[in-house]
Image: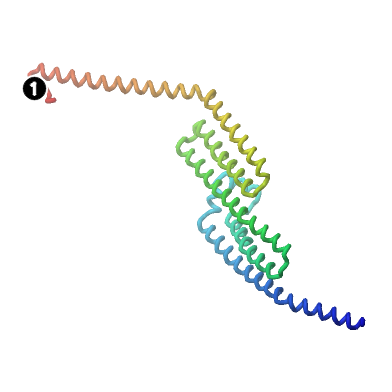
Amino acid sequence: MYAFSIGDSLQKASDTFFNFLPNLLGFLVLLIIGLIVAKIVAGIVAKLLEKSGLDRRLAETQSGRMIENSMPKASAARGIARVVFWLIFGFFLVAAISALHLASVTVFMNQVLAYLPNVIVAILIFVIAALLAGAASKAIERTMGGSPMGKIAGAVAPALIMVIAMFMILVQLRIAEQIVEIAFAATMGALALGLALAFGLGGRPVAQDMLEEAYRKGREEQARRQSTSTSAEGHSHAAWADGSPPPSQ
């Protein structure tokens, strides 16, 4: 009787193993294929981003320099390529785990895979914001030069772009979304109030000087035109008095 029970148990274990073996082989095959495909695609993405000069352009911005100081030899191109690698490999990993017919693990991997696009979008937001901040800083420097207002605008505009980008990244990553929204509204409100006070109170003498300068230039231009017109009429009358015919109208 005991011998029959042991034999029956061994038979059941053997049947279970051999029934599970195709699933295990499918898991390993999908995993290997996913690893190869993810590496190839990530390598292509990294090379394309490096050829486009993404790292060089970011290194020229203030945000890029801050990242370089905090994380030496960091590369946005390699970072994006790494995220692409895990995104593609994650698809194959979920498919491979599904081949094992383990429901709980499959659900968990589906949740992880659904979150990876948010990480990619967050990285893209940071990269685009850093490029825009650098472009805004250069544009302000070219148009306003080293004037006090130019220095203020050159410092405020890039910082404002990066602050907005950071709030967008936190929302994209679903980190305390309600608190982030409240903090964003409070920050924008405080910034608007500060700018209104700065330009309303501190900028009033500047606005007055600008208006006075514009008014003075307008009066000078009007006086110059009147002087030119009077001089032309004087020459015309003088020529008529000498017997010359008046100019045709």
Residue 242 vs residue 71: left or right?
A: left
The residue nearer to you, when weighing 142 against 197, is 197
What x and y, as percent, mark residue 224? 29, 21
> Is residue 46 positioned above or below 185 on the image?
below
Residue 30 vs residue 203: left or right?
A: right
Residue drawn at the location 65% of the way across and 50% of the way down? 71
Quadrant of the image occupied by residue 87: bottom right
Which residue, as the protein is rendered here, is positioned at the far right? 2
Which residue, as the protein is rendered here, is positioned at the far left? 243
The residue nearer to you, when weighing 191 against 219, is 191
Work out which quarter of the rendered image holds the C terminus and state it: top left
Q: Secondary structure at mark 1?
A: loop
Which residue, as the protein is rendered here, is positioned at the far top? 241
Specify few, some or many for label 1: CA neighbours under 10 Å numbering under 14, 14-19, or 20 or more: few
The amino acid marked with disc number 1 is Pro
> Is residue 18 positioned above or below 89 on the image?
below
What x and y, as percent, mark residue 26? 67, 74
Quadrant of the image occupied by residue 248: top left
Task: Look at mark 1 in the image and give the residue it sits on.
Answer: 245
In this figure, which colouring scheme has been used for the structure? rainbow
What x and y, as percent, mark residue 119? 62, 53
